[in-house]
Amino acid sequence: MSIDGLPELPPDAFRKQDNGDDLAFYGAPRLVTHIDEAAVGALAACYRNLLPQGGRVLDLMSSWVSHLPDDGDYGEVVGHGMNAVELSANPRLSRWFVQDLNRTQTLPLEDHAFDAALCCVGVQYLQRPLEVFCEVRRILAPGAPFAISFSNRCFPTKAVAVWQSLDTSGHASLVRLYLERAGFGEVSASLLRDGRESDPLVAVVGRA
């Protein structure tokens, strides 16, 4: 697996245990949330402060829920994911598309068309993160935020090796590295939940 642009990572950084077809793995709908209620609430609060009202939002690696605040009023929310049933069940999405980002990184979206992008609990599965993040930067308006959030849960056979070798602080540093190498600025990390009374949750945000 190529690690062009990330020479400090080991050669097998993006290896995963299960090299089978990802679309087949995610073929059965999973209508569950992958973080608990308190973490969902913290993420919604983060989005409330971050996302512009009336803006166009890309929800990358989405599912049947987007964790957007109930009082958020967005011009359009475009969802990307791996399962059509899940995406079609998401009431916040204006439209959606299915795409395996480990096979095809180019997004079928126009340049500078979005005012924000989100990726919740999915970054650990990306085998070509720089290519994907560069595509996200391409479709974002200048200064628009890209918010990547993650917890301590994953499908271990599908998470890349470097992710599984790191702790929470290491995950935040890795996502920061992805963002900075992809050309994002003003990168910051926030601990939204510390894990003592709910799932831990971290958000790393960069601006196009």
Image: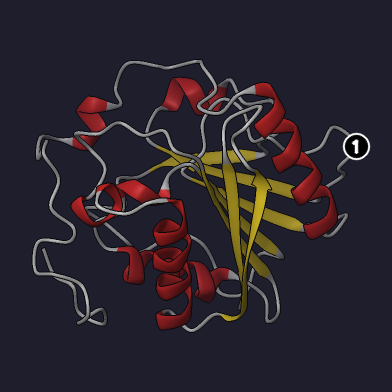
Can you give x and y, in whole percent of width and height, for residue 158 in the image? Answer: 23, 38
In this picture the colour scheme is secondary structure
Residue 44 image-quadrant placement: top right
Between residue 111 and residue 92, name the one nearer to us: 92
For the image, the number of numbered tags is 1
Between residue 97 and residue 156, name the one nearer to us: 156
Left or right of residue 119: residue 22: left
Q: Residue at (19%, 34%) from the top-left corner?
A: 157
Between residue 73 and residue 68, name the one nearer to us: 68
Residue 21 image-quadrant placement: top left
Q: Residue at (14%, 45%) from the top-left corner?
A: 16
Can you give x and y, in whole percent of width and height, for residue 98 in the image? Answer: 40, 39
Name the amino acid type tagged 1: Asp
Left or right of residue 189: residue 53: right
Q: Quadrant of the C terminus?
A: bottom right
**Dot 1 crowding, Cα within 10 Å, few <14, some 14–19, many 20+:** few
Residue 189 image-quadrant placement: bottom right
Q: Residue at (68%, 62%) from the top-left corner?
A: 116
Q: Secondary structure at mark 1?
A: loop
100 above or below 172?
above
61 above or below 186?
above
Can you give x and y, in whole percent of width and height, for residue 30 in the image? Answer: 42, 17
Can you give x and y, in whole percent of width and height, for residue 149 in the image? Answer: 56, 49
Q: Quadrant of the N terminus?
A: bottom left
Q: Which residue is mark 1?
A: 71
Q: Residue at (46%, 43%) from the top-left corner?
A: 61
Q: Is residue 134 visible?
A: no
